[in-house]
Image (cartoon, rainbow, N blue to C red):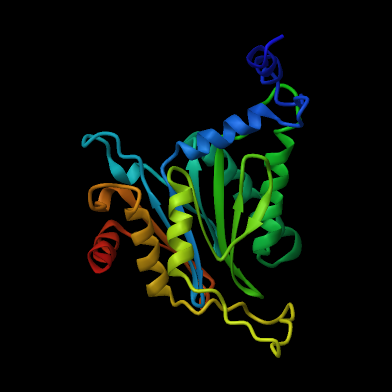
Amino acid sequence: MNSNASQQAYDRGHTIFSPDGRLYQVEYAREAVERGSPSVGIRTDDGVVLAARKPVRSPLLEARTVEKSHRIDDHVAVASAGHAADARQLVAVARESAQRHRLRYGEPIGVESLTKAIADHVQEYTQTGGSRPYGTALLVAGVDETGPRLFEVDPSGTPYGWRAVAIGNGAAEIRGFLEDRIRQPHQTETKTKATASEKQTDGIGREAGLTTALEALATTVDEPLSTDEVDICVVDAETASVDLFSSDRVSDELQAAS
């Protein structure tokens, strides 16, 4: 059997490992994410910025109906890349997990706990027969007792913590841009280890983070970004609240970043 035929045999089911330990259906799901319009997340000292480019395929399409960022709870939001329908389902799962935690414990869910709950759900669909992996990735942004937090959940169900990250089409180029623009936290030999109660600081403010996110998105297109194709969401650290920008505010931010 040639290699191509062998691959076709192993990619017919996502619960079967290939001889070299790969799950082809999960890799195909990652490819679906890479073909989606990009989303960028940046953790700042004042909160977390999410910016996403919306796929507005026609001037006849109502841009406001294309949602790339979503409020999950008062203190948590997500941005997606990949299949929009899959993202909607994961948003529903995340909202249910957050509300269940509030009802059970009388307090907002931790950002990392919510991320792991989403990741557990996604991972289950990589090993359960009669289903398929989710063809979407999420950026989970929020604020908890440790400060602003930013996580990524990929189609394999693996959560990653980030200071700044991009998912979707052109993510590698955007990450390179972010690595060049966002400085590393200063570290010295005498610096003591941070305790769990200490807030994380990244040396970048909210406005600078927002400008950087929009500039990063602009690297994926040849023409200037338009108001209709950009979604902006900010989770504020001081108020622990989610701020979804209106089209007028998006327009103002694009002008300020240009």
Examine the rendered structure and indicate whether residue 83 appears above or below residue 140: above
Q: How many marks?
A: 0
Residue 242 at x, y percent in the picture: 48, 64
Question: Which residue occupies the foreground of this view, 20 or 103?
Answer: 20
Residue 42 at x, y percent in the picture: 49, 64
Residue in the picture at 34% in, 61% down: 215
The quarter of the picture where residue 140 lies is: bottom right
| Residue 187 located left or right of residue 213 | right
Question: Which residue occupies the foreground of this view, 173 or 118?
Answer: 173
Residue in the picture at 64% in, 62% down: 111
Quarter of the figure with the N terminus: top right
Residue 9 at x, y percent in the picture: 70, 14
Name the residue furthest top.
Answer: 1
Is residue 49 shown to the viewer in this render?
A: no
The quarter of the picture where residue 74 lies is: bottom right
Name the residue furthest front.
Answer: 2
| Residue 184 located left or right of residue 132 | left
Name the residue furthest bottom.
Answer: 190
Examine the rendered structure and indicate whether residue 82 appears above or below residue 176: above
Examine the rendered structure and indicate whether residue 161 appears above or below residue 4: below
Is residue 148 shown to the viewer in this render?
A: yes
Question: Which residue occupies the foreground of this view, 26 or 119?
Answer: 26
Residue 168 at x, y percent in the picture: 47, 44
Residue in the picture at 66% in, 75% down: 146
The quarter of the picture where residue 24 lies is: top right
Quarter of the figure with the C terminus: bottom left
